[in-house]
Amino acid sequence: MSSASTGRACALGFAIAIALLMILGGSAVRGTTDPREPAQAMTVTVVLDRSSYVNGDTVSATAIVYRTPAPSNYTYTWTVRDSLFRIWNTTANGTAAFAYPIPLNYTDSSISLDVMVDDSQGLIVESQRSAGVSLGVMALRLDRAEFVPGDTITATYSVRSHVIVNPTYDYQVDDSAASIVLSGNTNSTSFSFRTPVPASRTYAFLVTARDGVNRTQARISIAQAGGVDLGVVFDKVAYSPGETVRAHLTVTPRGMTSLPSQFEWYLSLGAIFGQTTFATAITTVPEVDLTLSLPAGVANGDILLVAVEFRTSAVRYVTVHVGTTSPLWTTELGGIPLFAVLLGLLFILLLVTVVGLWRRISGGLVPASVRPSEPVPTGLPVPPPPPPEAPVRTPSVAAMSVACQHCGKPIELSTSKRPIEVMCPSCGETQLVT
């Protein structure tokens, strides 16, 4: 290649490099004068205060908005629809919190709250949430979890509704074959059913609350008691390391459960020092006595025991205490713990003391109306009151009289002084008495 050709190639390369620098420099400048925002995103979630309502309840909804890169001023438009997309309410220019009272005449079984959020910068996102609606809901419970044939089962119930306000309750009890064994109606909030002997394996309780054409109901079932109870009783409440644990195991049938003719027992202390301490036995009666020896080096504390009767699949987990225990908490008197007896006696003693103090204080109180005006000094004897004064006796005057010299009528004299001139009260004449 000639030197001329080389020069032209270098010039062309230099020109291309200058053009690229100008393009890149121009782009950076435009970036500073016309910045491009990162990709924007906004999500909206509607949260309801409940998942179901009754007619007349107020639905409280909240719109939770998440937006990047930064939040803005939002505009909320709420719309309430039913399952047929009929609009029941529209609220424009609302807030993130929205409340809607469900009308009493609302006829659909669900309600949907939609919100449209506008960030005033070109992003509009819509979200909705639905909930169930009913005329009312009922509470229904039985007084026991299971029954034995012959038991009386009591059902209690109530209704929460804004349209069923004066309900009449229709009730029925169905057995496991779906046959009605009891039915009726009442204004009371409970009824009872006595199970027969023999009884169905299960019973279903159905209660309907009605007020005019409005009604709601609840249903609950109960099963007959079954299976067995495995009881474990130890000879002591606490043991020492190396001591022998003696346990009495029993199996008691529940309900109509039948027991097998042979029983296989298993009692284990679990893994101690890497070994499992256990005892087994087979009996033809539903009880057994088993013994286990505690290792000599076992630490103080509670140890878990597992009792099993394999033929009935009964399992029971219990604990035994290793170490010393306070006799106050373990000793019993007539089946009552000693500490409970002592607490009872202490309470009675305190009660007697309080009553005695109250009577002593109240007995020394003097009514305010008879209290002395000045308090008596403490420690000095109280002087006795003065004796009452004897009545003053007036000397008696002997009655004296003289006859009037004019009319003969008597004239009473009040004094023995003589001579005295007196006047007759009858005729008015005066005379001298000597």
Image (spheres, grey):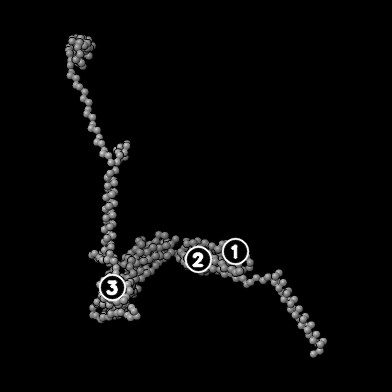
> In what quadrant of the picture does the N terminus appear?
bottom right
Label 1 SS: strand
Q: Distance between the residues labelled 1 and 2?
A: 19 Å
Residue shown at the point (27%, 75%) measured from the top left? 243
Residue 286 visible to an observer of this rendering: no
Is 347 placed above or below 112 here? above
Q: Distance between the residues labelled 1 and 3?
A: 76 Å
Closer-to-camera residue (187/265): 265
Residue shown at the point (29%, 49%) measured from the top left? 358
Q: Three-letter amino acid code at disc 2?
A: Leu
Contact, mark 1 vs mark 3 (Cβ under 8 Å): no
Closer-to-camera residue (24/3): 3
- Circle nearer the N terminus (1, 2): 2
Which residue lies under the disc numbered 1? Answer: 75
> In what quadrant of the picture does the C terminus appear?
top left
Label 3 SS: loop
Label 2 environment density (alpha carbons within 10 Å; few <14, some 14–19, many ≥20)? some
Foreground disc of the pair 2, 3: 3
Which residue lies under the disc numbered 3? Answer: 240
Residue 277 position by quadrant: bottom left
